[in-house]
Amino acid sequence: MLTAGFALATLVASTAFGAPAAAKPSLDQAVTQAMGAAKGAEARSIYELAPAAGLATIVEPDRTSKDGRWVFGGAAFRVPTTTHAGPVTALFFGHLANGRWEIALEGSEAFARASADAPADLMGAGERATLASTAAPQTFADSAATGLALPWKANGGNWRHWGVHGDSGTSTPYNAIDFYGGDRYVRAAAPGRLYRFCGTSTPYIKVVHDNGWTTGYYHTYNQTTVADGSQVALGAYIGEIGEQLPCGGRANGDHVHWTLWKGNTAVGVNGKEIGGWTWYAQSTAYQGYAVRGSTRINNSDCCLTNYGPGDPGSGVSAPVYNPNGSVNIRSGPSSTATVVRSVASGTTVNLVCYVNGDTMTGPWNNTSKAWDRLDDGNYVSDAWVDTGSDTPVVPACT
């Protein structure tokens, strides 16, 4: 039996002697009731609906234990077609006990207990541990660090954003950013477990990360085919930016609606370090910006580079590349500067900042005058570093 204060919906079967046999309890109805009690007000706010407006609930059982008494799956409220918003969702455990379904929703202590109590044929130890992390106390430290990358290739550049906003345009907190451009391929912001919602061939995807954060990815297509609950790595392929609406809503232009959550509670991105940038919201939606060093990227400005899960300005690790041999590390940004050492092709170096020096042509026939300063104070031509970008991915040296 779930404790008071947590989402619980039950359908009680009749047990009176001589009474007609009770109908089989409805899991769908129990989940719908639990979602309404725990997430209904939030969904109406995000979807910009009147307080008493009805909500259509999509319930998707994913796994059932062999004895039929445990179910694990996901649920979502369908987004009205008038609203640009990501869906309000929750993973759930259903436990049939004493003739009724007990429902534990993602983010609650009951959910953490259910992840521990569910039978082994429903879920393995690794997934249990990840899901238990969603029940962290609903207070959030002031620390800016999230340990999250931006949702595309490491060191990949030429992406843009449509500002910081809520899960819908005006809802608060401002926990969402729309990203577009680049190579179009959306990737996981950190290691974690992947889950789908709202059916169809292009569902809404979210990743419950091993560090307690959860990130959402809406509007993608050509998606990964890994099974629900699979462990995915940092940078694992999610899908391609698009305008897909499996849970409803509306979209304008190819992008990924990326959202930040902790314990299934939306967390604003203001002041958070994501992808090597510090993100800032403003009082008006879609007017936020990203800062790294002296660089500020406003709504639709070019260009955002994904510096990975580290702190802003902490440097970028990338391999040097020369198919014909080694790469020279020099004392200055010049082809005539002293060769301090030579490193084998594929060796990873840590880039701190860049300066302009002699123009060099690298193995991709890209010509660059940028030289990357390494963490030891020496230099390598950016033309010989595999950063995934034709332009520097670190700030200019000051």
Image: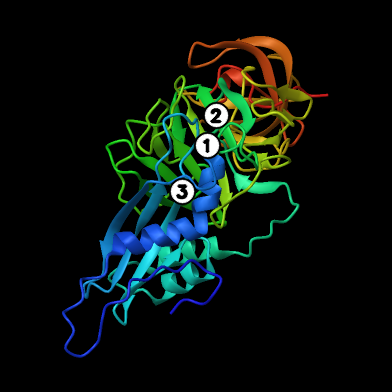
Q: Nearer the viewer, mark 3 or mark 1?
A: 1
Neighbours of disc 1 within 10 Å: few (<14), some (14-19), many (20+): many
Task: Give how far apart the Cα atoms at labels 3 and 1 are.
Answer: 11 Å
Q: Quadrant of the C terminus?
A: top right
Residue 83 in view in this figure: yes
Q: Position of residue 324 (x, y in %)?
A: 46, 22
Earlier in the chain: of badge 1 and badge 2, it is 2
| Above or below: residue 251 compared with residue 224 | above
The image quarter containing residue 370 is top right
To which residue does mark 1 refer?
258
Q: Are marks 1 and 2 in contact (CB under 8 Å)?
A: yes
Question: Mark 1 is on which residue type?
Answer: Trp
Front residue of this view, candidates 372 and 182? 182
Q: Is residue 114 left or right of residue 342?
A: left
Residue at position x 39%, y 32% from top?
Answer: 220
Mark 1 lies on a secondary structure that is strand
| Above or below: residue 356 compared with residue 346 | above
What label sits on residue 207 in the rendered view? Answer: 3
Q: Is residue 144 left or right of residue 12?
A: right
Residue 155 in view in this figure: no
Neighbours of disc 2 within 10 Å: few (<14), some (14-19), many (20+): many
Q: Position of residue 258 (x, y in %)?
A: 52, 36
What label sits on residue 178 in the rendered view? Answer: 2
Question: Mark 3 is on which residue type?
Answer: Val
